Image (cartoon, rainbow, N blue to C red):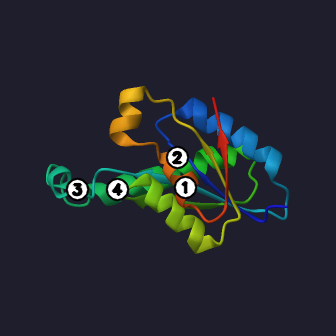
């Protein structure tokens, strides 16, 4: 049914990453093109970036890429997948990547936030669901 699936993951939440990838295995077979991604957010703001030495963001992105590759290989039993690590606002980068690859499904976990956080920050999941041009499967923990 779905041919190109994008799976955005928050590497800071190991338990949710593991649960998400276990669910993803139920939706894929050898014909599915699978894309895993993660986002480094906050560093693009000049005030934040000024506190880090030159090259720190690139090192962080590479470390995240390696971690995502390792986690994906282990959880998906070495099944093939593409890895993408980006810097920016999570919802925008997820929607942008889905469009770039022509995804027909995004599978993502809903983050648990309190009411104040939802009002102040908004929900990445809600924004992706509103803005993505493809189906979005939201996993609740």
Q: Are marks 1 and 2 in contact (CB under 8 Å)?
A: yes
Quick one: label 2 or label 3, which is nearer the N terminus? 3
| 22 horizontally vs 15: left or right | right
Residue receiving disc 2:
126
The answer to whether the residues at label 4 and label 2 have Cβ atoms under 8 Å apart is no
User: Which one is closest to the eye, mark 3 or mark 4?
Assistant: 3
Residue 75 located left or right of residue 62: right
Name the element at disc 4.
helix
User: Which of the two residues, 120 or 29, is positioned nearer the viewer here?
Assistant: 120
Is disc 2 placed on a helix, strand or loop? helix
Spatial CA distance of label 2 from label 3 is 23 Å
Q: Quadrant of residue 119?
A: top left
Looking at the image, can residue 22 be seen?
yes
Q: Nearer the viewer, residue 133 or 52?
A: 133
Residue at mark 3 to residue at mark 1: CA–CA distance: 25 Å
Q: Nearer the viewer, mark 1 or mark 4?
A: 1
Instruction: Give me the disc on residue 59.
Output: 4
The residue labelled by disc 3 is: 45
Point out the tag, 1 or 4, that comes first from the N-terminus. 4
Camera-side mark, 2 or 3: 2
Under circle 3, the secondary element is loop
Specify the quadrant that holds the C terminus.
Answer: top right
Per the image, the residue denoted by label 1 is 130
Image spot of residue 26 (x, y percent):
82, 44
Separation of residues labelled 1 and 2 (CA atoms): 6 Å
User: Marks 1 and 4, Cα distance to the nearest angstrom?
Assistant: 32 Å
State which tag comes first along the sequence, 4 or 2. Answer: 4
């Amino acid at each position: 049914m779905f041919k190109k699936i994008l799976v955005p993951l928050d590497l800071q939440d190991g338990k949710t990453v593991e649960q998400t990838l276990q669910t993803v295995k139920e939706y894929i077979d050898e014909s599915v093109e699978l894309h895993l991604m993660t986002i480094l957010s906050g560093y693009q703001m000049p005030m934040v970036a000024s506190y880090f030495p030159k090259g720190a963001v690139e090192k962080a992105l590479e470390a995240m890429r390696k971690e995502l590759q390792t986690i994906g290989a282990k959880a998906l039993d070495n099944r093939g997948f593409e890895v993408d690590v980006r810097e920016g606002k999570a919802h925008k980068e997820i929607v942008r990547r889905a469009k770039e690859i022509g995804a027909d499904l995004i599978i993502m976990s809903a983050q648990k936030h309190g009411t104040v956080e939802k009002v102040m920050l908004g929900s990445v999941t809600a924004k992706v669901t509103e803005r993505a041009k493809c189906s979005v499967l939201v996993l609740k923990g």
